Image (tube, grey):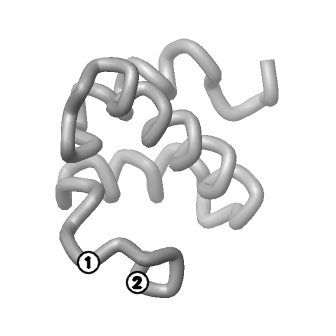
Amino acid sequence: MSRAGADREVFTADALILLHETASSSLREIDRLATAGLREAAWRKKKLVERKVMAHVVGDLGTDGS
């Protein structure tokens, strides 16, 4: 994240754990879900991607690309 210019925490520890578990260590899934999490947090005007936001994203997108 620092390479992208972030100078603060963007994901909470709980959100990262959920992201990792859901994506099954697939880099493509991590990228897809993390991007969706960032968009959802921005839409909600949140500065951090929290577990609740990631759970919403995971529920909407799942891990099968649908």
Callout 2 environment at 10 Å: few (<14), some (14 to 19), or many (20+)? few
Q: Residue at x 23, y 37 (%)?
A: 51
Query: Tag 2, which secondary structure?
Result: helix
Query: Which residue is farthest front?
Result: 5
Figure label count = 2
Residue 30, image x and y in percent?
60, 56
Residue for badge 2: 2
Residue 62, image x and y in percent?
62, 25
Q: Nearer the viewer, residue 46 or 32?
A: 46
Report if the CB atoms under discs 1 and 2 are less than 8 Å apart: yes
Q: Earlier in the sequence, mark 1 or mark 2?
A: 2
Residue 39 lies, with reference to residue 13, above or below; the image says above
Residue 42 lies, with reference to residue 26, above or below; the image says above
The circle on residue 7 is 1
Residue 65, image x and y in percent?
80, 28
Is 57 displayed left or right of 42 in the figure? right
Q: Quadrant of the N terminus?
A: bottom left
Q: Nearer the viewer, residue 8 or 50?
A: 8
Quadrant of res 11: bottom left
